[in-house]
Amino acid sequence: MNALLLLVIVAVISVVLFSSLNRKTVDKISRARNELRKQASALRPYSVSDFLKDAGIADDDHRAHALLGVLAGVLEVEPEKLARDYPMRDLLVISIDSDGNNQSKTIDPFSSELLEKVVALSDKRLWDQKWRDNPELPRNEDDLLDLITKMSVGEFLRFFSPLIKSARESLIN
């Protein structure tokens, strides 16, 4: 009977601690998302057409426009706010104070969501071809996330927009 009582006490304490610790993590991620969105909202708008031209991308490249729209949607800003060659890391990753102990912790609340949306819009055959042509390219999620955060917005668009399904292919699939 004592063992059963001890087991119940340990289980209750575990549930309470797990909920408490998990809530702190969720709060940090939420705070990081809000701060990054606030920073992105404060960026000065710029012409998407001029930005694409400066980045060496044709203004009529609907895939690049769609991809910039996906990035803007993740950050909840207009595409014009992101129409500069900002480092993706500055847009997607933030350091926040870790529990007030003067140590900062890097949090990346958006890269996985962004990659998931990019993959959903991508054509698998185009990815397979890109990997055949460039076998050194990352093939797993963590390495792709790392690659994205090392890019600028222009590099991101130049790399991923050729992999996006055309509008006609998206309607068929």
Image (cartoon, helix red, strand yellow):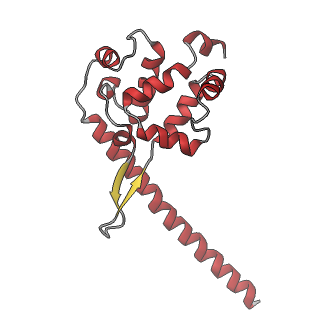
Q: Is residue 41 above or below residue 13?
A: above
Q: Which residue is situated farthest in the right direction here?
A: 1
Q: Locate the N terminus and report the quarter of the image it occupies.
A: bottom right
Q: Which residue is situated farthest in the bottom direction here?
A: 2
Q: How many marks?
A: 0
The answer to which of 71 and 164 lies nearer the viewer is: 164
| Whether residue 112 can be seen here | no
What residue is shown at x 54% (from left), y 43% (from top)?
A: 143
Left or right: 166, with 42 as reference point: right
What residue is shown at x 50% (from left), y 26% (from top)?
A: 160
What residue is shown at x 68% (from left), y 85% (from top)?
A: 6
Left or right: 10, with 111 as reference point: right
The answer to which of 131 and 141 lies nearer the viewer is: 131
Q: Quadrant of residue 150?
A: top left
Q: What percent of the width, then of the height, locates residue 115?
A: 53, 35
Q: Quadrant of residue 77?
A: top left
